[in-house]
Image (cartoon, rainbow, N blue to C red):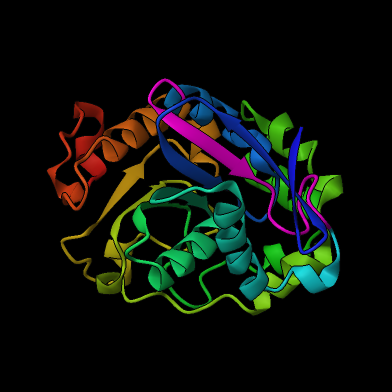
Amino acid sequence: MSVVLLESAVVHYEALGRGRPVLMLHSWVGSWRYWISAMQTLSSTYRVYAIDLWGFGDSTKLPDKGHFENQVALIDRFLDQMGIGRIALVGHGLGAAVGLEFARRNADFVDRVVAVGYPVRSGALDLRLSQASVTEVAQWLLGDNTGVEAVISETPKINTKIVQQCLAELPSTPDWNSLPTCLLVNGGNDPLASPPMAEADQVLPENCHEFYLDQAGHFSMLEDDLRFNRLLMEFLALGSGESPRSLQLKEEWKRRVR
């Protein structure tokens, strides 16, 4: 287990591979652990980091650390402490919101962002997230799907108050034109996050693109890991500043790509 101390508080992270840096940020339930398959896939080309946000996994659980603003600041301090320069961010759910907000403030520093299961409009998260226990939410989202243990086993470590704080402070949808190259990945059966961007009557600019993975729910990196990892590799391999709409689409993606 690897940790850094930020303002005398512990931040747990894991790292794998060599190459350009990629930082992975987890969702409302679980921890860094469910990124393992994606990290292994990317590690042949990239130096991949996955961290536990404040209140999750093996990072500090103090409630005063768990405000949304502090989660965004955590990314800044972690990258500075590790000496990491220009970065690609891959965020899921809460991690997607944190990553997009960090990218909005640091567009010259963030090369690109992948936002998985991101709530693209206000009020788009199912109320069960705020009303049920974290373990119940995880079981509802994953059921008997492969990889469920990587999420369920971590739920006892989560500070529920921090989840509630971040929910209450979740910012509005960002101005997509103000962001670096961005890829939105939505599970076709996601019961938690908002409808896809195209169905929300919002038009994405050239620097952003959205993919559906039909067979996946909220945890597409677990439920459709092969296609998710291939899509991730394709996106990260694009030239800096290149539109994600130039991706060479695989046949099985075409039906639901917008």
* Residue sitting at x 74%, y 68%: 66
Rendered residue at 77%/67% (across/down): 162
Residue 161, position in %: x, y? 82, 68
Helix, strand or loop: magenta stretch: loop
Say whether residue 212 is left or right of residue 99: left
Question: What x and y, as percent, mark residue 103?
Answer: 41, 64
Q: Quadrant of residue 75?
A: bottom right
Q: In the depicted view, which residue is nearer to us: 162 or 151? A: 162
| Left or right, 149 with reference to 252 | right
| Quadrant of the snapshot with the N terminus | top right
Position in image of residue 237 (x %, y %): 26, 35
Q: Residue furthest top?
A: 44
Q: In front: 246, or 112?
A: 112
Relative to 253, does residue 5 appear above or below in the rendering?
below
- Asked if 238 appears above or below 203 in the picture, the reply is above
Q: Is residue 78 magenta?
A: no
Magenta span of residues: 43-60
